[in-house]
Image (tube, rainbow, N blue to C red):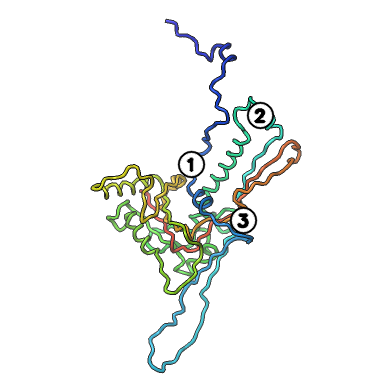
Amino acid sequence: MTIGIAAEDMADVVLSTLNKFHKDQWVGEMTDIQEHVGFNDMCKKKRERLDGSRGDRVRVITDHNYAAEATGLFGTVDFKRDDAAEEGTVPWRYIQAPMVFDTREPDMNSGPERMFDHIKVEDARTITSLVEKGEEYCWGKPDNSSDATTPWGLEYWVVPNATTGFNGGNPSGFTSGRAGISSSTYARHKNFTGAYTDYTDQAATGLITLMEEAATKMTWVSAAPEPGMGRKGYTKSIYLDYDRRWALKNVSKTNNDSLGFDLSTPEPVFRGAPLKWAPYLENKSTHPVYMIDNNTFYAVFLKDWYMKRIQVEKLPNQPTCFGIVLYMTFNFVCHDLRKQAVFYSNI
């Protein structure tokens, strides 16, 4: 039996017949991250724009005045005052992503011979680079206070601790505290924490148990009217890796077995907050679970500096080349630590 010849081995076929021509179509395989959840949530969808400023501020009143006391008729009043206001600063941080082109490229990459626009491809690659770096910054922190370039992500603002309760103190490397307000000096200036040993609500250190306690205790109702800081209108979010999300979804499935489990449910929720898979958290060995109030934790941008494009004409010693740089001027801010929580474990 004759095996035959592949079309690719026949010169006449190769020269006379093209493969299927998919004009201006391509698929990106530029990143290992399925979705840049942190960047899309905090920097794109829920960001805030600040007009002219050197950054943002956080302001807390650290205590009441202990003025109340029991008294009787004709009692005297002792008037006294002390200071309780503390203010921290959140300076701008900057990201840049450059790309370069030769002015002859568009002429070569044109006409019926063009299979796809490689200028747009390079643009997509640069945007992906910027977003991926932004995703890294969403979840991370600078090494220490001498780092004046790295943005202040979740690990900076929401600090873990094995003890359940409001124990998230100063981040490592920042003895003066977050934005300059020390949790060592002001014991109330802390986020909620805990370490979980399983996923259920059957043990004191079960993840659902800790989440229930945090959700209840992070609901602060002020005794007197106060303006607050941050904003209104945004929901809470819970960010976690795949295994934690799957485990909680299975707990939900078990608890609702008598009613039937809806396999089409795209996102399980906890007290109305969606459990969002954040692929970047797969890199974290402690498997953190973040409960975030999006009204008080978010990214702030200098106006018009979210992915701003600046073109550089005629690069030095390369008169036919020009560059484009994508810039972001921003940082992350948390206006209320006591509305944020993080849990961790090695399971």
- Position above or below: 75 against 111: below
Q: Residue furthest top?
A: 1
Q: Quadrant of residue 242?
A: top left
Quarter of the image where the N terminus is located: top left
Q: Is there CB contact under 8 Å for labels 1 and 2?
A: no
Camera-side mark, 1 or 2: 2
Tag 2: residue type?
Answer: Ser
Spot occupied by residue 295 in the image (x, y as percentages of width and height): 48, 60
Q: Earlier in the sequence, mark 1 or mark 3?
A: 1
In the foreground, 144 or 330: 330
Spot occupied by residue 42 in the image (x, y as percentages of width and height): 51, 52
Residue carrying label 2: 110
Residue carrying label 3: 303
Cα distance in 3D space between marks 3 and 2: 36 Å
Q: Secondary structure at mark 3?
A: loop
Q: Which mark is residue 33?
A: 1
- Position above or below: 11 against 87: above
Tag 3: residue type?
Answer: Lys
Q: Earlier in the sequence, mark 3 or mark 2?
A: 2
In the foreground, 236 or 192: 236
Q: Is there CB contact under 8 Å for labels 3 and 2?
A: no
Tag 1: residue type?
Answer: Ile
- Position above or below: 65 against 190: below
Q: Residue at x 49, y 45 (%)?
A: 36
Q: Secondary structure at mark 1?
A: loop
Q: Earlier in the sequence, mark 1 or mark 2?
A: 1
Question: In the image, 294: left or right of 256?
Answer: right
Q: Which mark is residue 291?
A: none
